[in-house]
Structure formats: structure tokens, C-alpha cells
Image (cartoon, rainbow, N blue to C red):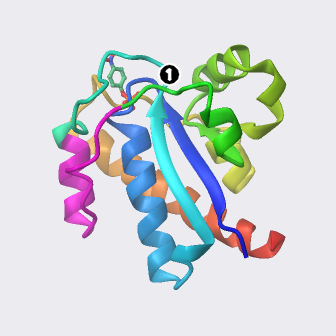
């Protein structure tokens, strides 16, 4: 069966979405379903193109056995709206920006926590926050990604 292609999107592609990418892959690996998905991440902004993830995202991923140190930031491109089956924004602003950029693909764009867990919650931007915010971020992403994987399993 063809894998479901998932793009996680945040503002900078250095804090939330690279961690979501790493967590989603890890959750699928643990469940023995890594071949069921193809995951990537990108930012709506271009400030961090080519940069590694924020050191706090690298550290919290590492603490849970996930290596995202080699990821590099990139900006969402027009081709992504064809290349992915679902494009999951971390917060409402990401979702608005994505739908504005490609109105014809608006049906592929969803708020991550709403789509994954039916919870109308943003994944808050932790960039100006403390290390504890990255622990909360990890827990939120782990819960969301586990729920997303279960949802994909039910749909197949
Ligand atoms: P992210 O966090 O969207 O989760 O990657 C941010 C990273 C950088 C900036 C904002 C948010 N920035 O303004 O540079």
C-alpha cells in the first residue's frame, strides 16, 4: 500500500515541525508501521532555511531517543501541495498562511491537534520560552502523533 505522505509545518522549521517529524517517525517505527508513512517538515518563513533544529528541540528529542540533529530547515514550496497527502500546521496562523498560499489545496491543510486528536489546540511556539516548554512540546507532539498514527490505521 502507498504510504501516507505527511508534511508538518510551523513558522521557522527549527522548533516544532522538525520535532514533530522526528516523533512521528519514531512513533510509527515503534508500532512497526514506519513504511505506512512518509514524513517531512517545513516552515512558512524563510529565516532558518539550511539551519539545524533549535538546540532545545535537538536535546529533547535526544532525551527520548530520537535524533533530529541532521535535519535542516526549509521553507514550504508550491510543489509540497502536490507532493503531500496532508499538510499539518502547528498553529492557526500556520494553517491560515498555508491556505492563503495555495487555496486550491486548502482541503489538504489542517490544524495538527484538531486533525490528530479532535482538539482545537495550537501547538504553542516555544521559541521565546524556557526549556520546560520543550518538554511540554514533546509530550503534546507524542500524544498527537500517536493519535494520528491510530487514525491513519483506522482509515486504511
Ligand atoms: P518554530 O519556532 O516555528 O516552531 O520553528 C520558531 C522559530 C524561529 C522563529 C519563530 C518561531 N523566528 O522568529 O525566527
117 lies above or below 75: below
The answer to which of 58 and 130 lies nearer the viewer is 58
Location of the C terminus (image quadrant): bottom right
111 lies above or below 125: below
The answer to which of 60 and 108 lies nearer the viewer is 108
- Residue 145 at x, y = what percent? 55, 60
Residue at image location 20% in from the left, 50% down from the top? 69
Q: Quadrant of residue 155?
A: bottom right
Q: Is residue 120 left or right of residue 27?
A: right
- Residue 72 at x, y = what percent? 28, 39
Q: Secondary structure at mark 1?
A: loop
Farthest-out residue, bottom: 32
Q: Is residue 45 magenta?
A: no
Q: Is residue 42 left or right of residue 126?
A: right
**Residue identifier under label 1:** 44
Span shown in magenta: 56-73
**Res 111 seen here:** no
Quadrant of the image where one finds ligand 1: top left
Amino acid at each position: 500500500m502507498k504510504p501516507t505522505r505527511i508534511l508538518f509545518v510551523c513558522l521557522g522549521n527549527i522548533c516544532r515541525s522538525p520535532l514533530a517529524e522526528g516523533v512521528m517517525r519514531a512513533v510509527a517505527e515503534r508500532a512497526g508501521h514506519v513504511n505506512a508513512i512518509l514524513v517531512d517538515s517545513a516552515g512558512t518563513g524563510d529565516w532558518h532555511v539550511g539551519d539545524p533544529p533549535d538546540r532545545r528541540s535537538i536535546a529533547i528529542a535526544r532525551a527520548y531517543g530520537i535524533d533530529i540533529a541532521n535535519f535542516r530547515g526549509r521553507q514550504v514550496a508550491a510543489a509540497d501541495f502536490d507532493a503531500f497527502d496532508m499538510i499539518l500546521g502547528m498553529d492557526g496562523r500556520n494553517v491560515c498562511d498555508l491556505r492563503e498560499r495555495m487555496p486550491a489545496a486548502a482541503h489538504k491543510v489542517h490544524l495538527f491537534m484538531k486533525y490528530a486528536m479532535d482538539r482545537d489546540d495550537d501547538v504553542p511556539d516555544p521559541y521565546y520560552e524556557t526549556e520546560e516548554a520543550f518538554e511540554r512540546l514533546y509530550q503534546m507532539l507524542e500524544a498527537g502523533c500517536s493519535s494520528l498514527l491510530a487514525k491513519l490505521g483506522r482509515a486504511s
